[in-house]
Amino acid sequence: MTRTLYAYAFLDDLVLLYPVYALLFADTGMSLWQISSLFALWSVTAVVLEVPSGALADAVSRRLLLWIGPLFNAVGFTLWVTVPSYGAFALGFVLWGVGGALCSGSLEALVYDEMERVGAASLYPQVMGRTRAARLLGTVASMGLAGPVLALGGYPAVGAASVLACLVAAVAATRLPEHRVPGEQEGAGGGWWATLRAGLAEARGDRAVQGALLLVPAVAAVWGSLDEYVPLLIRDLGVAEATVPYLVLLVWAFVTVGSLFAGVAERLGTRGLAVLIGGAGLALAVGAGLRTPAGIALVGLAFAGFQLAEVLADVRLQHRIDDARRATLTSVASLGTELVTVAVFGGYALLGASMAHSTVFVILSVPYLVTAVVLGVRGRS
């Protein structure tokens, strides 16, 4: 299963439009306000559909959703390059949001259940760490290929390559194993709505589940927002424009390597996880505050720590939730991450209006230090 899983993850993020879609929008004549509204529409779609799609994944085949999701993405990307306009871009983002929501929670739930079935649930952190590394490699490959493909065939060629990757990802998803029968699981007999209600009731009634649900956005949201601003942080160092992409790749190289240590890091326990998050928070503050290329390396190291902590937070959640509602509650955690991410974007915009990017990065390291203290106290108790 793991080879197919890694291939699926790589292909799902091998979207050559990633690094150039903002250019496509601008070249089509979209204003900054219109481009920002498209990003907001994308986020709103994810927020609205996150939990309902998770409940759907607990009521039907998760593998089915994993291969349908990339097809929504493919249709959206096709619209972008064949009829470029604000309406097409907006519909494309909605379709991309639908595709992402269908797969969010479904993949983690399917992998955990299949590994638990063969008695290998203890390897889940290692497998998901490698899965995230495969996704990051797909993103990095997209960055490297987008330029040459754009030069050769323009946006239609970049769009065609992105659509092809989505189609191959859908084919790969059909090869993932799934032995679970939704209708035979407790809570699934009443269909999608009953599954959603049962999942939310579990979240309300179990404090251990609540803590695990809160930890996911506490770890994932801030750094997941800051990564969008890394190029701006680097450019403020005064380096040549041509150097910026290389330093961005350096950051993501750290993140990719960090994902591979998830299996080993699971042995840390609660207090060890607190030290990991606190150490990464300090590295983020110091690295951003240095305002040097060496500081950017520290930011990359901090992001690697956060990525690792994010995998471990997901592991803690999977260990605490019931199989019949696994995708529902995983999506609840993802919803929390989406909501906090939107708040971080707003906070960054407010702070960035009067402060340097490095200062904003330092300020936004504070939530991680608070999270580390809370976890450390719980670990002692």
Image: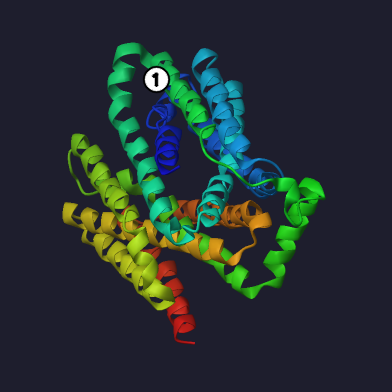
Disc 1 element: helix
The answer to whether residue 353 is visible is: no
Viewer-nearest residue: 259 or 324: 324
| Residue at horizontal 34 percent and vertical 69 percent from the top | 276
Please say if 366 is above or below 186. Answer: below
Q: Is residue 153 left or right of residue 292?
A: right
Q: Amino acid at mark 1?
A: Val
Residue at position x 45%, y 21% from top?
164
User: Would you say 226 lies left or right of 35 here?
Assistant: left
| Quarter where residue 311 is shown | bottom left
Instruction: Indicate the position of residue 105 as horizontal and vertical percent values.
Output: 58, 49
- Determine whether 39 is above or below 276 in the image: above
Q: Position of residue 121 (x, y in %)?
A: 48, 59
Quarter of the image for residue 9 reads: top left
* Residue 161, position as x, y percentages in the image: 41, 20
Screen quadrant of the N terminus: top left
Which residue appears farthest toward the front when viewing the image?
118
Q: Quadrant of residue 231?
A: top left
- Residue annotated with mark 1: 158
Q: How is the image coloured?
A: rainbow
Give the camera-side residue of 142 and 175: 175
Farthest residue toward the right?
190
| Above-or-below relation of 212 to 334 | below
Residue 169 location, x and y as percent? 47, 30
Classify residue 31 as left or right of residue 62: left
Q: Residue at 33% x, 39% y: name it.
A: 137
- Decide if residue 42 is in sight here: yes
